[in-house]
């Protein structure tokens, strides 16, 4: 009954006004702003000043499994360097006009996941990552546009944002970044700690640090049509087998032996017509594709633990998805980190809650109608594979 009650409480939460969205509801935001027009939100997170210092961000940028970039302007030319970076590199930086960006901070810090959780009115399947940037005075990445939606949440310090809904999106040739050739400021604001700016895809923008500042960017995944097509064809290659071989028992002579004849074209076209798919195939593809960890992600090995010891601690402390894990589902089929999850009948409710909340607390487990042995074994397997960790 507890799960049912919580579900009823959550069923209308998207219609409630949110400070995060400037006092409008998630439903209103999605209807009027998402993919449509920018939204400036003063005091979106009133007490927020960030959860990283510049030195801590630089520390992350020194790690091998962290994606980071250093962008600077030298004599009006843009420079791009890829991490990891040494401490010596940071010590040689000038006092202004550069920025450090660290991707997927949510893969490394609980505080980053806590911030992302506040945007769960947008499906996890669309979420990409939380990027954190630091810049001294004048630093930024130049006038540019993104092909995806982004929330720009200001941490410590201030940043001047200029935006333009211009149609001219031509880029500077030869630049290491996607810098706009012509940028025409239409609106501008200075954002302070806790302020946030939402931008739909292709809205040109330019952020410039006003003194030292840090910005937290919540970005959403928007694969190109070509990427989806290529990945889906790869999926079909692994999950489809066409029977038979090419044959032409009625072959006739042709005037030019180098010509690919109409008969061969028709025959191969007929074979390829057997390559069909339906919505269930697309659902499976999306579940596997959207949860597949990116190539640079490394899962840290956990401390070994017996099944019995694991079961006791899980019930005492609860478990949560590791920062690098993604758990999604379509109907009754679940997908974790690029694999289909096989469940018993008693486990679906708990796994659904873990997927939605990224957490199963000790209270959640104590209130579950039944915890099967299969579920404990499954969680133990996930723990050993570093897909989940203990909550406390």
Image (spheres, grey):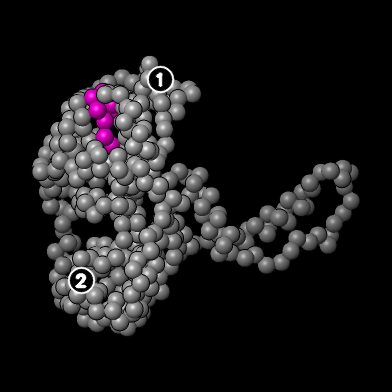
Q: Does 221 sit left or right of 263 as displayed?
A: left
First of labels 1, 2 by sequence position: 1
Q: Can residue 350 be seen in this view?
A: yes
Residue 135 falls within the magenta-colored stretch: yes
The Cα atoms of the two marked residues, 1 and 2, are separated by: 53 Å
Quadrant in which residue 91 is drawn: top left
Q: Does 391 sit left or right of 375 as displayed?
A: left
Asked if residue 346 is positioned above or below residue 299 in the image, the reply reads below
Question: Residue lying farthest front?
Answer: 88
Q: Does 320 sit left or right of 330 as displayed?
A: left
- Labelled disc at residue 77: 1
Kindly identify the residue that appears in the image at 63 percent across and 58 percent down.
Answer: 273
Horizontal and vertical percent position of residue 266: 72, 53
Nearer-the-camera pick, 44 or 83: 83
Say if mark 1 contacts mark 2, CB within 8 Å. Answer: no
Residue 110 falls within the magenta-colored stretch: no
Horizontal and vertical percent position of residue 59: 30, 43
Q: Can residue 131 be seen in this view?
A: no
Nearer-the-camera pick, 290 or 202: 290
Kindly identify the residue that appears in the image at 34 percent across and 78 percent down.
Answer: 306
The residue wearing badge 2 is 317
Quadrant in which residue 370 is drawn: bottom left
Q: Does 321 sit left or right of 237 as displayed?
A: left
Asked if residue 266 is positioned above or below residue 211 in the image, the reply reads below
Q: Give the range drawn in magenta.
A: 132-140
Q: Which part of the image, by quadrant, shows the N terminus?
A: bottom left
Nearer-the-camera pick, 131 or 305: 305
Give the class, few, some or many, for how many residues have Cα within 10 Å of label 2's Cα (few <14, many ≥20).
some
Horizontal and vertical percent position of residue 208: 26, 26
Quadrant in which residue 10 is drawn: bottom left
């Amino acid at each position: 009954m507890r799960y049912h009650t919580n579900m009823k409480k959550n069923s209308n939460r998207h219609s409630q006004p949110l400070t995060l969205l400037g006092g409008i509801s998630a439903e209103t935001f999605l209807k009027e702003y998402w993919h449509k027009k920018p939204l400036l939100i003063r005091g979106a997170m009133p007490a927020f000043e960030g959860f990283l210092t510049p030195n801590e961000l630089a520390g992350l940028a020194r790690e091998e499994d962290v994606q980071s970039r250093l962008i600077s302007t030298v004599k009006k030319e843009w420079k791009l360097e890829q991490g990891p970076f040494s401490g010596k590199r940071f010590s040689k930086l000038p006092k202004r006009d550069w920025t450090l960006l660290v991707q997927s901070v949510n893969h490394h810090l609980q505080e980053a996941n806590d911030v992302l959780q506040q945007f769960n009115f947008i499906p996890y399947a669309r979420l990409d990552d939380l990027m954190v940037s630091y810049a001294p005075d004048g630093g930024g990445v130049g006038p540019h546009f993104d092909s995806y939606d982004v929330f720009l949440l200001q941490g410590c310090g201030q940043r001047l944002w200029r935006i333009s809904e211009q149609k001219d999106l031509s880029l500077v040739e030869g630049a290491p970044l996607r810098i706009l050739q012509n940028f025409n400021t239409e609106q501008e604001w200075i954002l302070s700690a806790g302020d946030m700016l939402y931008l739909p895809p292709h809205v040109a923008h330019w952020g410039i640090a006003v003194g030292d500042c840090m910005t937290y960017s919540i970005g959403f995944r928007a694969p190109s049509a070509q990427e989806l097509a290529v990945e889906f064809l790869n999926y079909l290659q692994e999950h489809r087998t066409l029977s038979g071989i090419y044959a032409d028992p009625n072959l006739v002579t042709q005037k030019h032996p180098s010509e690919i004849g109409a008969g061969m074209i028709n025959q191969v076209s007929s074979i390829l017509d057997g390559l069909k798919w339906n919505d269930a195939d697309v659902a499976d593809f999306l579940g596997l594709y959207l949860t597949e960890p990116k190539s640079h992600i490394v899962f840290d090995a956990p401390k070994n633990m017996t099944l019995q010891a694991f079961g006791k601690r899980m019930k005492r402390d609860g478990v949560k998805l590791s920062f690098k894990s993604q758990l999604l589902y379509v109907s009754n089929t679940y997908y974790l980190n690029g694999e289909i999850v096989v469940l018993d009948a008693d486990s679906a409710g708990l796994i659904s809650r873990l997927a939605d909340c990224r957490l199963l607390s000790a209270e959640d487990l104590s209130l579950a109608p039944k915890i099967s042995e299969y579920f404990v074994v499954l969680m133990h397997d996930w723990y050993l594979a570093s897909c989940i960790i203990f909550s406390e």
